[in-house]
Amino acid sequence: MNSNNLNQIWNIDPAHSRIQFSVRHMVISEVIGNFKVFDLKMKSSEEDFSESEIEFNIDVNSIDTGIPDRDAHLKSDDFFGADKYETISFKSSSLKKLNDEQYKLIGNLTIRNITKPIELDVELGGIITDPWGNERAGFSIRGTISRFDYDLKWNSLIETGGAVVSKNVKIICDVEVIKQK
């Protein structure tokens, strides 16, 4: 991708975006958490976003599962090691358009200073001009990673042999971006 032609810049609207994760707990239920502080920048050359570069940063210390003790454990070295690894980052290598609404986002995800390639499913919700003249686009982003790939290896087993926390983590992001004027 020729970044010289990426003349459209889109910034995240954090008030209308959410970055969540979901992980199976004790084999029987899902625990959902989110990050409250994040930033996304997208540069595109095409109106349909088919040629875009995306960079995303998340403040690990902004994790919120609704349970302060669990949040503290997730920030500890058993999981994110937030005192040493403060940021989760993603940098795209391509955004492939599959049809009018579906895309495949490919890039590198870095957690705990470990970078691995990842593929995410993206759905374009639409593009509108808001009442104040700003062009907005909405996206749903979904994917799954293995937390073990990023050294989030705390693992305790329950009596039946299942893990207290599943190795697979679902990524659930709904973002709204505003085109920079």
Image (cartoon, grey):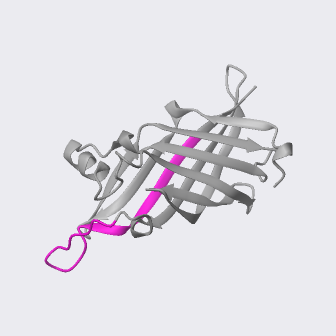
The quarter of the picture where the N terminus appears is bottom right
- Point out the residue furthest to the left here: 159
Q: Residue at x 36, y 47 (%)?
A: 82
Q: Residue at x 41, y 49 (%)?
A: 85
Question: Residue 66, located in which quarter of the rendered image?
Answer: top left
Task: Compare residues 61 and 15 and report the one nearer the observer.
Answer: 61
Q: How many marks?
A: 0
Task: Compare residues 172 and 53 and report the one nearer the observer.
Answer: 53
Q: Is residue 7 above or below residue 108?
A: above
Q: Is residue 35 above or below residue 142?
A: above
Task: Compare residues 107 and 98 and report the one nearer the observer.
Answer: 107
- Point out the residue furthest to the bottom here: 161
Q: Is residue 30 left or right of residue 178?
A: left
Q: Is residue 146 above or below residue 138?
A: below
Q: Residue at x 28, y 59 (%)?
A: 78
Give x and y (percent) for residue 15: 50, 30
Give x and y (percent) for residue 169: 41, 63
The quarter of the picture where the C terminus appears is top right
Give x and y (percent) for residue 51: 79, 52
- Point out the residue furthest to the front here: 84
Question: Residue 40, located in which quarter of the rendered image?
Answer: top right
Q: Is residue 158 left or right of residue 179?
A: left
Q: Is residue 52 left or right of residue 105?
A: right
Residue 167: in magenta span = yes
Residue 104: in magenta span = no
Q: Is residue 149 left or right of residue 81?
A: right
User: Magenta region: which residues?
Assistant: 153-175
Question: Residue 35, located in which quarter of the rendered image?
Answer: top left
Give x and y (percent) for residue 24: 32, 64
